[in-house]
Image (cartoon, rainbow, N blue to C red):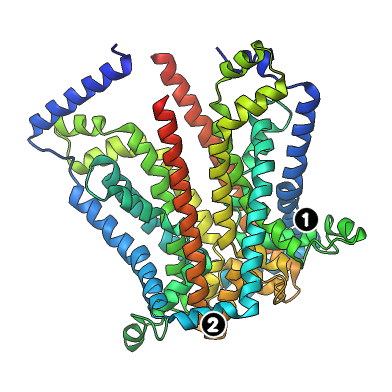
């Protein structure tokens, strides 16, 4: 029975209530979500394509884009490998302290990005635990590129693991055992059996991780010296341009990241419809 | 007696057992490697940084802590942060319920679009949300100028902080209530109606009580996010000391002044309150599980 036919007269709200609630929803979403999204592109292109192009070809803007891509390129593969390892370890075996480990993996979601940056200063700053030792080796972390990378990693650690753990929990280990008992090696089992099963959630986790890594602001702004053309990421450059009253350039850069977040949203609804489709198919087989 | 599920689970177990016997191993390969790497990474990236903050905080004397919180500027920022966060979470729970209810129960044009837009604050970088909100709610912005005509300042005011925190917390409220509304048993509503209850009575006595746990979880998640929020707030807030300065910003300005101890003191209070909130969520979930387990 479909859900609509189950919604009998008794659980159906009167038409006027429906209209009011839908109206409130649409109004709220317009005011708080659609307008902010729209205004980014409006402000970015208001002065014409030429201003947009000049803003993006600016030397500092280009170096900010470069640093963001560098930090993302280091952070995302690391967190992806971590996510796979953590999901495998926590779903294929049972060991004491497992739920504590899962809670610790989730911690960066609960910690304010500014506090995350503060923690890194306590560790790698001049007076920090490792700061002096690293300094004597000639490596500056805080107020330099490594600090930006570390801050980006910290805030994005849970993304891939979070997507994979529930999926792998649900799938169990039956298929892996079958592969092993048929003589497959561990690596074959992982690449030929596990990976195809978790491909979509893995992809989505990586996408979320990428979007967040490119857009992180609070943690990065604390550990970066905000030197233009050197340690500024795209969000930091946007902040700097905005404070210089150069709003068109700020919004031009912002529109790139806003496009990325729209792609993330589209990917999410595509993925959800795909998963829904699959579960319907498997229901029909049963 | 035997559901298909339980029979299948038994068969699976038997299959796994025989596979284990056939291969003479008791665990899937990779335990040492994956757990070892996970523990190493978590220790390096999460545990050591948190330990650094906690150790630093424990070295702060009680007098220093009290001194920090006696400062009017710190008190004002904590009042604003907690007040605006609580208010924003309350508003989000209310409107989040209406949105979740409309999206689950009603069919209307643009429903799917709105449904996917709900997650925008998750996906959008906070600094960009910040300048976008400022552009709209500033005195010259398309919404801000209408409010200004009524004498209401929607930016560079505590109201601006509230607007940003509503924006950032909204998806938490909607996304926790949506599945709860989907799982509601329509039979209960029908039974209530057939016993003569009006639609409103049914909603108040039958539907609403079973949604309270989800609403509380959504409220707590939105609150936790709001307490630590930085990027989306600082542009629209204007950051006037004593008036529109949030706690996260105060931590940043302490760091700019090289006052690491002061920054840590504020950070520890913020962290402690966030953990209390997370424990509350765990408590709610435990309570729900116990309640549904009994049925």
Q: Nearest to the eye among marks 2 and 1: give it.
A: 2
- Furthest toward the bottom, the residue is A136
Residue A124: x, y in percent?
Answer: 39, 78
Give the camera-side residue of A2 and A257: A2
Q: Which residue is drawn at 61% across and 25% down?
A: B206
Q: Provide the chain ID for the residue under circle 1.
A: A
* SS for callout 1: helix
Give the camera-side residue of B68 and A137: B68
Q: Residue at x 59, y 79 (%)?
A: B70
Disc 2 to disc 1, C-alpha distance: 48 Å
The residue beneath circle 1 is A42
Q: Is residue A179 above or below residue B72?
A: above
Residue B259: x, y in percent?
Answer: 52, 84
Residue A146 in sight from this viewpoint: no
Position of the C terminus of chain B, as image quadrant, is top left
Residue A129: x, y in percent?
Answer: 34, 80
* SS for callout 2: helix
Give the camera-side residue of A226 and A193: A226
The residue beneath circle 2 is B67
Give the camera-side residue of B214 and B196: B196
Q: Residue at x 72, y 65 (%)?
A: B236
């Amino acid at each position: 029975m479909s859900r609509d036919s189950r919604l009998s007269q008794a659980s159906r709200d009167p038409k006027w209530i429906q209209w009011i609630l839908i109206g409130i929803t649409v109004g709220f979403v317009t005011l708080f979500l659609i307008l902010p999204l729209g205004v980014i592109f409006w402000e970015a292109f208001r002065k014409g394509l030429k201003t947009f192009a000049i803003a993006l070809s600016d030397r500092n803007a280009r170096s900010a884009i470069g640093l963001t891509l560098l930090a993302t390129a280091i952070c995302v593969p690391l967190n992806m490998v971590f996510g796979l390892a953590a999901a495998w370890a926590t779903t294929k075996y049972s060991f004491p302290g497992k739920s504590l480990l899962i809670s610790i993996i989730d911690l960066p979601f609960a910690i304010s990005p500014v506090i995350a940056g503060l923690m890194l200063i306590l560790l790698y700053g001049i007076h920090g635990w490792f700061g002096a030792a690293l300094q004597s080796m000639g490596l500056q972390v805080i107020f330099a590129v490594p600090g930006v990378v570390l801050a980006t990693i910290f805030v994005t650690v849970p993304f891939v693991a979070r997507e994979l753990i529930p999926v792998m929990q649900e799938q169990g280990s039956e298929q892996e055992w079958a592969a092993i008992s048929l003589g497959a090696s561990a690596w074959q089992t992982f690449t030929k059996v596990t990976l195809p099963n978790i491909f979509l959630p893995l992809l989505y986790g990586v996408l979320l991780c990428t979007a967040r890594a490119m857009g992180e602001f609070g943690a990065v702004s604390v550990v970066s010296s905000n030197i233009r053309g050197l340690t500024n990421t795209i969000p930091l450059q946007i902040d700097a341009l905005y404070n210089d009253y150069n709003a068109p350039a700020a919004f031009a850069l912002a529109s790139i990241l806003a496009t990325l977040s729209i792609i993330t949203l589209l990917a999410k609804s595509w993925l959800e419809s795909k998963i829904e489709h699959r579960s319907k198919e498997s229901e029909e087989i049963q | 007696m035997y559901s298909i599920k339980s029979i299948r689970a038994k068969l699976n177990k038997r299959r796994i057992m025989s596979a284990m016997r056939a291969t003479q191993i008791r665990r899937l390969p990779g335990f040492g490697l994956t757990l070892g790497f996970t523990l190493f990474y978590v220790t390096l990236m999460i545990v050591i940084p948190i330990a650094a903050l906690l150790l630093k905080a424990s070295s702060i004397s009680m007098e220093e802590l009290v001194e920090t919180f006696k400062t009017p500027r710190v008190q004002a920022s904590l009042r604003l942060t907690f007040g605006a966060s609580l208010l924003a979470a309350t508003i989000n729970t209310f409107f989040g319920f209406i949105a979740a209810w409309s999206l689950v129960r009603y069919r209307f044009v643009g429903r799917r679009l709105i449904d996917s837009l709900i997650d925008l604050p998750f996906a959008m970088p906070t600094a960009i949300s910040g300048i976008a909100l400022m552009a709209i709610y500033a005195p010259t912005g398309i919404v801000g100028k209408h409010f200004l005509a009524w004498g209401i300042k929607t930016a560079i005011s505590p109201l601006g902080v509230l607007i940003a925190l509503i924006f950032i917390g909204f998806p938490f409220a909607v996304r926790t209530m949506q599945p709860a509304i989907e799982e509601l048993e329509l039979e209960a509503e029908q039974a209530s109606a057939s016993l003569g209850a009006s639609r409103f009575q049914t909603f108040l006595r039958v539907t609403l009580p079973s949604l309270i746990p989800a609403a509380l979880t959504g409220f707590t998640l939105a609150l936790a996010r709001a307490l630590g929020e930085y990027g989306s707030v600082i542009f629209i807030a204007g950051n006037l000391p004593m008036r529109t300065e949030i706690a996260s910003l105060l931590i940043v300005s302490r760091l700019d002044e090289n006052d690491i101890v002061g920054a840590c003191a504020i950070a520890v209070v913020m962290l402690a309150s966030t953990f209390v909130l997370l424990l509350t969520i765990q408590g709610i979930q435990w309570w729900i599980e116990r309640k549904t387990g009994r049925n």
